[in-house]
Image: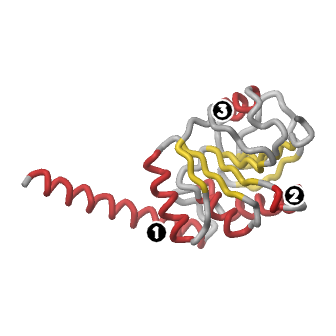
Amino acid sequence: MFSTILAIFTLFISVLILIWTCVQIYINYSSDKIGFVPSSSPKLSQAMYKIVHEYIKKQEKYTFVELGSGISNNTITAAKRFRFKRFIAVELDPFLVVFSKFFAFLNKVNIEFYVADLYKFQIPKDSIIYCYLGNTIVTKLYKQGSFKGQLVISTTFKINDVKETQSHYIGGIYRKIFVYDFRGEK
């Protein structure tokens, strides 16, 4: 009896969390406020759109990869706006990947989800890498060669000791987006 009550209670709490998250995402998408998922603000989305159109002429040739995707708002937004050949979201937390899959289903977008360690994940050739990770993490990924031959869009955090190709001021808590074009490196 106790296990049945516990299961029902757990299901109830999960549904409440899901509803709360959906409401927060809706608020975030429909306003310029920083909400539950700040890395998907409209200003950030607009800047990413501008960068992609400036750097990528044939979108169908590239794969969009979000490293540390959380609940994949940026990957979902990209899948709705761009024509890349593939969309990949990489996240270490399996719970967040479950939410991501649900949100991708609701948005009717095709995204490949991976529960993986960023340092071990093999990024496909010809990728646009989007990340909102700390300096230490992006610098380590760069030093291990993960970004070789890729276009990297990093929100807020720079790769230490590497000059960005371009930066875009977007204000708010993000301040800047840093673009690194490593496509000439093989």
Q: In the displayed structure, does residue 75 sit left or right of residue 143?
A: left
Answer above or below: position of 117 versus 63.
Answer: above
Between residues 106 and 121, which one lies in front from this camera angle? 121
At numbered mark 3, what does the secondary structure look like: helix, strand or loop? Answer: helix
Q: Quadrant of the N terminus?
A: bottom left
Name which residue type carries label 1.
Answer: Val
Residue 42 in the image, given as x and y percentages of width and height? 67, 65
Q: CA distance from mark 1 to mark 3?
A: 31 Å
Name which residue type carries label 2.
Answer: Ile
Between residues 178 and 98, which one lies in front from this camera angle? 98
Residue 112 in the image, given as x and y percentages of width and height? 60, 55
Q: Label 1, on which residue?
A: 23
Mark closer to the chain start, 2 or 1: 1
At numbered mark 1, what does the secondary structure look like: helix, strand or loop? Answer: helix
Q: Tag on residue 137?
A: 3
Q: In the displayed structure, does residue 135 sit left or right of residue 128?
A: left
Q: Residue at x 82, y 36 (%)?
A: 148
Q: Tag on residue 56?
A: 2
Residue 85 in the image, given as x and y percentages of width and height? 75, 60
Q: CA distance from mark 3 to mark 2?
A: 25 Å
At numbered mark 2, what does the secondary structure look like: helix, strand or loop? Answer: loop
Number of callouts: 3
Q: Quadrant of the C terminus?
A: top right
